[in-house]
Amino acid sequence: MPVYAPAQPFGGPIEVFTRLAEGLAAHGHDVHVFTTSLTDLGAGRSRHSRVEWHGGVRVHYLATPVSFRWMGVTPTLPLHLERAPRPGVVHVFGFRDPIGSGVAAWCAARRVPYVFEGLGMVAPKHRKVSLKRALDSTVFRGVLGGARAVVATSQVEVGEYRHAGVADQRIAVRPNGFPDVFPGGERGRLRELVGVGDETPLVLYVGRIAHGKGLELLVHAAAGLPGAHVALVGPDAGHGVTQELVALRDRLELTDRVHLLGPLPRAELPSVYADADVFLLPSSYENFGLAAAEAAAAGTAIIVTDRCGVAELFARGGALVVPFGEVEVRQAMSRLLADRGLRRRLGEEARAVAREWSWERVVELQEAIYRRAVVDA
């Protein structure tokens, strides 16, 4: 996988990697993680490898002398793979990165079965689409084709695999897990950061500040909701989106009501979610959308677009699922902010969904996928 804990600025996938690996180790499996030494987009490169134990998992942080953003080149990867015990099955996370492609090639050469999980990256989107398509048909062609099974976290991602030519019988659906339900307790951190009181309507977004997240819809929607404040929490993905949002906010005269807070420590997030009246995930595409799962565990009223994979798990309640669009987002925000009873009911339903989709259940589903891959081999 491209990065692993304690790296945080890379978003939800880090949490998924960690919870799966540690959950599998807790079930008695011998889990080795091979990853880069990258911890941040601006972190210095590393010419030394090291091995550390985290939560019962042996993590191989490989020397990464060259990197571009979150993609790192690890020249010693083949050596470390050969020295490690031969795996029964391998799980490759992510697409178009050197370490994942290298592991897939190693597995193919040594007849080791592997499972592939694309993390929503299989369909070229957002930037350099033509280049991605060219690479997918040449350099990375074998990564998908060599996998015994491919993991989709939602039917949204199933469609992405199908479009890439993956047959249905090779696709296994395994949602991401939800955190344990937060017990409540300390609140006020988010409102302190924003500078508003308990009675001020407050809408929260948590995630990367990036294209495709629908954040421009959220800012436009705020313009039609006088008195409502919006807080955006998360790291800048580095493509100028923060500057675009600041310019849009200022042009709409929302400087006092739209707050870009940057990333916050994960330990603070439970109280941040609980402090908001509404959590909104307005993305144009999410293979899952882990921040909505975190908001559900906090019992926060949720709005997600129907282009987010996690929306499927709210089919029986727990969130308002709306089409991707400014009008739809604004109407949902207005409805929830005006109805305290609806917010309370959605929050209770969201906690029930979180209990249903625990990480323990998800780890068991992942074990079944591995067993299938080994049998098919």
Image (cartoon, rainbow, N blue to C red):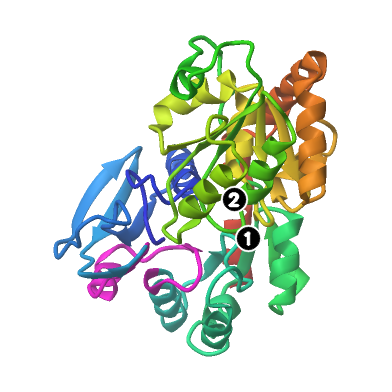
> Residue 151: which disc?
1
- Which residue is nearer to you in this view: 268 or 181? 268
Residue found farthest to the left: 48
The reply to whether callout 1 and callout 2 are in contact (CB within 8 Å) is yes
The amino acid pointed to by label 2 is Gln
Q: Residue at x 63, y 67 (%)?
A: 149
Taking 290 as reference, is 13 left or right? left
Circle nearer the N terminus (1, 2): 1
Q: Is residue 239 above or below residue 343?
A: below
The spot of residue 314 in percent (x, y) is 78, 37
Q: Tell me the quadrant of the picture where the N terminus can be found.
A: bottom left
Number of residues whose C-alpha sits closer than 10 Å to that of mark 2, classed few (under 14), some (14–19) or many (20 or more): some
Is 129 contained in the magenta span? no
Residue found farthest to the right: 316
Stretch in magenta: 70-99
Q: Is residue 177 above or below residue 94?
A: above
The amino acid pointed to by label 1 is Val
- Which residue is nearer to you in this view: 293 or 49? 293
Q: Residue at x 47, y 48 (%)?
A: 11
The spot of residue 235 in percent (x, y) is 43, 46
Taking 223 as reference, is 274 left or right? left
The spot of residue 261 in percent (x, y) is 44, 35
Asked which secondary structure carries label 2, the reply is: helix
Is 75 contained in the magenta span? yes
The residue identified by callout 2 is 366
